[in-house]
Amino acid sequence: MGHRLSGRVAIVTGASRGIGLSIAQAFADEGASLCLVARNPADLNNVASQLGLESSQVMTQALDVTDRDACFQAVAAAIQHFGHVDTLVNNAGVYRSKTFLDFTPQDFQDMLDVNLFGVLHFTQACLPHMQQQTKGSIINIASTAGKWGSRNQSAYNVSKHAVVGLTRCVALEASPHKVTVNAICPGFVETDMLDELKAQASQSAGTSIEDFEKAALSRVPLGRMMKPQEIAAMAVFLASQDATGITGQSIQMDGGMVLT
């Protein structure tokens, strides 16, 4: 167990599975106290019990990130419980794959409501507190889909491009208050969301899951999927004192798939 985040308090959305779960565990291992956010209270309680923290060091907030009032109430509750919040990890997200002509306006809206406006709600709820204490870090989990184009996921890509753009803009406004804002852009990561992606994307492309995965890996120079623990390690770094000079960046973690 490390100490890089000792005494820090972090809010992690989408904390009940996948990358969010790995980030929560990595933060706990580094000494942080946590407010865990996801929709299912039973899943949240299960995660909280696995982190190895004292009961006073962890709280759960079951909510939908599309509910702006609930997001603001969760942040207020975390500040009241812990006294301060130092890091926000906006990880909650959804994925959907169709051809562009098959996407409906509602499909785009649903993706934006979670992937963009969920980030917006929590960021606007946390930022005034962080600016007042003149310290803090906001870490948005975007995607390589926010840095390039790809077939059959235009709605997802649009939402993640928006997160990358929002990250840059908020970083500029928050920097005078010593608050950093960065995005992590994972490629293919071994999570249950990747399983959903492979099933939907292969169907949209009219190919088998096996052929889709083979084609996907052929675009990754390292020849493998990323692990959620690798994304979590970057999140820990960005939340630590070592990264206070980094802001407005969208850091790709994709095995070399997108080079910019």
Image: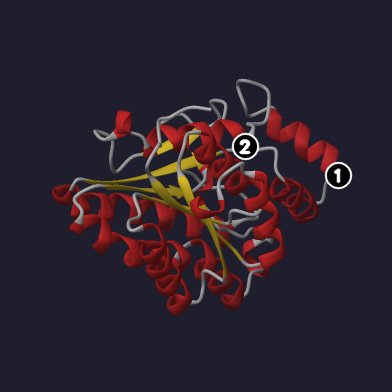
Colour convention = secondary structure
Residue visible at 63% across and 31% down in the picture:
226
Q: Please name the residue that numbered disc 2 is placed on.
A: 228
Q: Quadrant of the C terminus?
A: top left
Amino acid type, mark 2: Pro
Nearest the eye: 22 or 147? 22
> Residue 172 vs residue 117: left or right?
left
Number of residues whose C-alpha sits closer than 10 Å to that of mark 1, classed few (under 14), some (14–19) or many (20 or more)? some
In the displayed structure, 82 sits above or below 146; it is below
As helix, strand or loop, the secondary structure at mark 1 comes to: loop
Image x and y of residue 115, in percent: 51, 61
Residue that extends furthest to the top in the rendered view of this protein:
222
The residue nearer to you, when weighing 218 against 65, is 65
Residue 211 position, x and y percent, is 82, 37
Q: Which of the pair 20/192 is nearer the observer?
A: 20
- What residue do we see at 43% from left, 61% from top? 119
The secondary element bearing badge 2 is classed as: helix
> In this view of the protein, can residue 17 be seen by the observer?
no
Q: Dot 2: within a 10 Å radius of its alpha carbon, few (fewer than 14), some, or many (20 or more) residues?
A: some
Q: Which mark is residue 131?
A: none
Asked if residue 128 shows in the view, the reply is yes
